[in-house]
Image (cartoon, rainbow, N blue to C red):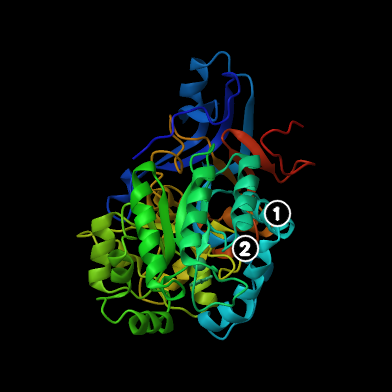
């Protein structure tokens, strides 16, 4: 696992502090005693230099060590957490989020494909990327694994906007060369791989940007495209390139894959056969998964994205975290919005939906486990657990500041819950539109709900 040790926000060594109640995870609470998996600082202080945390702990222990630390943001009635990480979403679907659909495949054909076809136009792509980033940052999401679409313009637009904020994202050109409208389809299979390689050279490890090989899903790629995509992924795996796709979302999709690839054992085996299942692979949904598929995902160290609001909205199927987190062969899981199948941009609001999805199947999901899936668990699913998703020395200094008084009613209600995890569960369940007050990226407050200029690019000063 690479740790990205270069300064990511050079400030000439100036120290910056952020103070308030603080929560960060150190281990997986699905696999170990929950009380041993997190650190909670009641009055915490995070010290940041050159975009990274250099020290974290209780204010009374840390502050005396840094006589030169003058610039401290104090957040009262709030909980500071690592910036949330969205393991799977489509920025190109922002213009059609919330559209009606009879089923996943109908919804894709009617709304998704026509919308994605418009991203050949760079100006349109730029406008959507700008709006998209404002949504995720305002919700406290600082890293995301993002689908673009077929066109290079759609990839450049999202990375350019990410670079302006200095966020760590993963994205890449979507590979799709069959069973789509001509306006969206890759016109040439070999050409689609050459273009992917060019974009990878341009964007992978440029600042905090990371590149993924992205076949949309098995049915919309020819066997040749899957094969070439797998070869490209394998050639670049050691450089930390990703593979990102959909898997086992809904039964009609699985049936389609079975018809197209009758010689393969199961859906996961289709990807595995073409070299697409490996340690940097991220698979979205995984609602209807056979035991042998979980074993393949475990053996390869793949990450899985749980997309509860999308699965409910599209009537897909239900994710089973207790299967994914089987102690014998655990699989890495992170939370995801899957915008535009998901109905909002908030990773935090997914947690309330994930609880309901579990409850429908005689399980539940508490606040400790949920918050882990939104932060450190998601970083593990994206193979970035040494880089983001924790407030600890050496990590990139991305944070969200959750408001514990986001509305008159929520503030009143929360006084009746006596510990922070009970309060967090209530907040997840009441689901205010947005309970994030501020967002830090590489130590800079790029979003502040209460500031006149709410959003700041990395090179802007107030
Ligand atoms: N499977 C293939 N493409 C998509 C998509 O855009 N959204 C969802 N939810 N599932 C998919
Ligand atoms: Zn998706």
Q: Does the residue labelled 1 lie within 8 Å of ligand 1?
A: no
- Residue at 27% of width from left, 50% of height from top? 32
- Residue 92 is tagged as 2
Check disc 1: other Cα within 10 Å, few if <14, some if 14-19, many if 20+: many
Classify 453 as above or below 418: above
Residue at the top extreme, as displayed: 67
Q: Where residue 175 sits in the image (x, y, percent)?
A: 49, 64
Mark linked to residue 167: none
Do the CB atoms of the residues marked 1 and 2 lie less than 8 Å apart? Answer: no
Percent coordinates x, y for residue 138 in the rendering: 65, 50
Using the rendered view, name the quadrant where residue 213 is placed.
bottom left
Q: Which residue is drawn at 52% across and 35% down?
A: 397
User: To which residue does mark 1 refer?
Assistant: 126
- 49 vs 430, nearest the viewer: 49
* Picture coordinates of residue 341, whole percent (x, y): 56, 71
User: Residue 1 in the image: x percent, y percent?
Assistant: 33, 40
Which of 122/33 is in front? Answer: 122
- Kindly identify the residue that appears in the image at 63 percent across and 49 percent down: 137
User: Does dot 2 land on a helix, a strand or a loop?
Assistant: helix
Front residue of 183/290: it is 183
Q: Does residue 351 show up?
A: yes
Residue depicted at x 67% and y 59%: 409
Q: In this view, does 77 lie above or below 247?
A: above
**Can the viewer see residue 285?**
no
Distance, label 1 to label 2, CA atoms, is 10 Å
**Which of the image's four quarters has the C terminus?**
top right
Q: How many numbered dots are placed on residues in this image?
A: 2
Left or right side of 274 for 436? right
Front position in the image: 367 or 312: 312
Q: Is residue 340 left or right of residue 224?
A: right
Q: Residues within 10 Å of mark 2 (few under 14, many from 20)?
A: many
Residue 108 as seen in the image, left or right of residue 446: left
């Amino acid at each position: 696992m690479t740790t990205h040790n270069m300064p990511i926000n050079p400030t000439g060594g100036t120290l910056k502090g952020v103070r308030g109640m603080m929560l960060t995870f150190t281990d997986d609470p699905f696999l170990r005693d929950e009380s041993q998996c997190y650190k909670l600082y009641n009055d915490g202080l995070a010290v940041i230099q050159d975009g990274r945390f250099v020290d974290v702990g209780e204010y009374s222990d840390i502050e005396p060590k840094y006589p030169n630390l003058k610039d401290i943001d104090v957040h009262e009635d709030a909980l500071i957490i690592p910036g949330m990480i969205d393991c799977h979403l489509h920025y190109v679907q922002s213009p059609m989020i919330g559209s009606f659909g009879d089923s996943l495949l109908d919804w894709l054909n009617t709304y998704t494909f026509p919308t994605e076809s418009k991203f050949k136009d760079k100006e349109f792509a730029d406008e959507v990327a700008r709006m998209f980033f404002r949504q995720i940052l305002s919700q406290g999401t600082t890293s995301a694994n993002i689908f673009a679409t077929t066109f290079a313009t759609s990839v450049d637009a999202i990375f350019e906007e990410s670079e302006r904020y200095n966020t760590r994202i993963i994205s890449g050109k979507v590979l799709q060369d069959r069973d789509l409208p001509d306006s969206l389809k890759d016109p040439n299979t070999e050409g689609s791989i050459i273009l992917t390689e060019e974009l990878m050279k341009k964007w992978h490890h440029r600042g905090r940007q990371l590149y993924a090989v992205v076949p949309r899903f098995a049915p919309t790629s020819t066997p040749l495209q899957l094969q070439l995509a797998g070869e490209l992924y394998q050639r670049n795996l050691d450089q930390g390139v990703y593979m990102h796709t959909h898997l086992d979302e809904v039964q009609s999709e699985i049936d389609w894959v079975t018809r197209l690839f009758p010689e393969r054992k199961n859906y996961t085996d289709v990807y595995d056969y073409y070299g697409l299942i490996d340690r940097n692979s991220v698979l979205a949904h995984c609602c209807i998964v056979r035991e042998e598929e979980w074993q393949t995902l475990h053996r390869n160290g793949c990450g899985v994205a749980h997309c509860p609001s999308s699965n409910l909205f599209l009537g897909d199927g239900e994710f089973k975290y207790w299967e994914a987190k089987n102690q014998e062969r655990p699989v890495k899981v992170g939370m995801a919005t899957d915008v535009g199948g998901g109905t909002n941009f908030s990773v935090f609001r997914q947690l309330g939906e994930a609880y309901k999805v579990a409850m429908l199947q005689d399980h539940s999901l508490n606040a400790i486990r949920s918050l882990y899936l939104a932060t450190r668990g998601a970083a593990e699913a994206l193979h970035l657990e040494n880089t983001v998703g924790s407030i600890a020395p050496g990590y990139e200094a991305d944070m969200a500041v959750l408001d514990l008084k986001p509305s008159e009613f929520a503030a009143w209600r929360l006084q009746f819950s006596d510990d922070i995890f009970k309060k967090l569960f209530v907040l997840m369940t009441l689901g205010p539109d947005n309970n994030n007050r501020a967002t830090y990226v590489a130590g800079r407050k790029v979003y502040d709900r209460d500031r006149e200029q709410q959003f700041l690019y990395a090179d802007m000063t107030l």
